Amino acid sequence: MIKLATTSLLLAAGTMLATAPAAAASTYAKTKYPIVLAHGMAGFDKIGPLDYWYGIPQDLTSNGASVHLTQVASFQSSEVRGEQLLNQVQDILAITGAEKVNLIGHSHGNQSIRYVAGTIPLRIASATSVGGVTKGSVVADLIKQASDLAVIGAPLTTLLTSVVNGFGALIGLAAGETLSQDSLAGLNSLTTAGAASFNAVFPAGVPTTSCGEGSYSANGVNFYSWSGTGVLTNVLDISDAGMALTSLAFAGQANDGLVSRCSSHLGKVIRDNYRMNHLDEVNQILGLVSIFETNPKSVFRQHANRLKLAGL
Ligand code: CA
């Protein structure tokens, strides 16, 4: 299930995108430091690191940014994924000769970028979390609960069955298929308890109140976040149905289908209620997002401009 691209492949993709700005249409997103994108969990190893951010790297590049894609294990603990990203960031720093990079992580990529920012802060200009699981997800809590019940053969409640089915649909698991050990490690990292353990080691930017902002900067790293609270946003997108099931886990609390509004906060909260679900945040599936909301590509482009204006 876990498939890692080779470093040379990753850098080939990064270099390809990094060379494109010569023909960039504008300098609106031309940040001082390269932008490194870190993906989230789930079955995205099937679509690859470029298509994960549907159209976003191309949009940033055509506006002058130097964009680098990375790929870590789709399902692993925050620490294993963080170490994999750290190695790739060090390669990008070495090859570009850049003094620092701007990290942007989606979903479980939140923990990956914070791991790297906490390990080599002098080389990181900013860490931005998009729909990030800063304080864990009740979806992960319930799936872990269902998994524990399955071990002892106990029946699942209707809520647990709905959440498990919705989650399975989102990550591409066939009915009846069970999570692998690596998947369970990934899941444990995303529970409320797992996230709290990680936050104890990497506290920078994490809000100390239940739904406030975090420190805007720590150890020279600037922290930002944004997220959505839409679930059913596009009738043509089949992934909305799975998200509608997992969103039941939140019992009415604002969420993007997989992460609550408050859990997504890290550093400066740019906005936490876009009409976007968890996949809309990265312009999925195939650009099927709400037509009544700012396009996700615009949100990334505006953020790159924000970094540029901040001298980052
Ligand atoms: Ca969508």
Image (cartoon, rainbow, N blue to C red):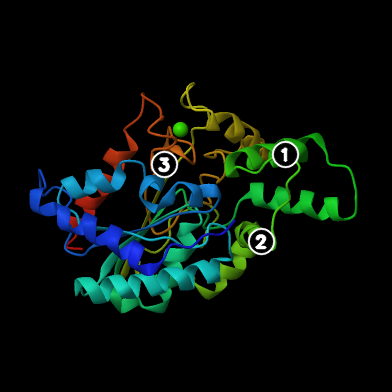
Single out the residue that lies furthest toward the top: 235
Rendered location of residue 216, percent (x, y): 35, 62
Query: Which quadrant is the N terminus positioned in?
Result: bottom right
Taking the spot 59% from the left edge, 29% from the top edge, the residue there is 241
| Residue type, label 1 | Ala
Residue 155 sits in which quadrant? top right
Q: Which residue is mark 1?
A: 175
Q: Is residue 241 left or right of residue 234?
A: right
Location of residue 224 in the rendering, given as x and y in whole percent from the top left corner:
36, 56
C-alpha span from label 3 to label 1: 26 Å
Disc 2 beta carbon < 8 A from ligand 1?
no
* Kind of residue at disc 3: Glu
Q: Residues within 10 Å of mark 3 (few under 14, many from 20)?
A: many
Question: Residue at position x 35%, y 29% from top?
Answer: 293
Residue depicted at x 80% and y 34%? 158
Note whether 125 is above or below 277 in the view shown: below
Residue under label 3, please give it: 281
- Residue labelled with disc 2: 188
Q: Is residue 55 above or below residue 18?
A: above
Q: Amino acid at mark 2?
A: Asn
Mark 1: few/some/many CA within 10 Å (<14, 14-19, 20+): few
Local packing at callout 2 (Cα closer than 10 Å; few below 14, some 14-19, many 20+) is many
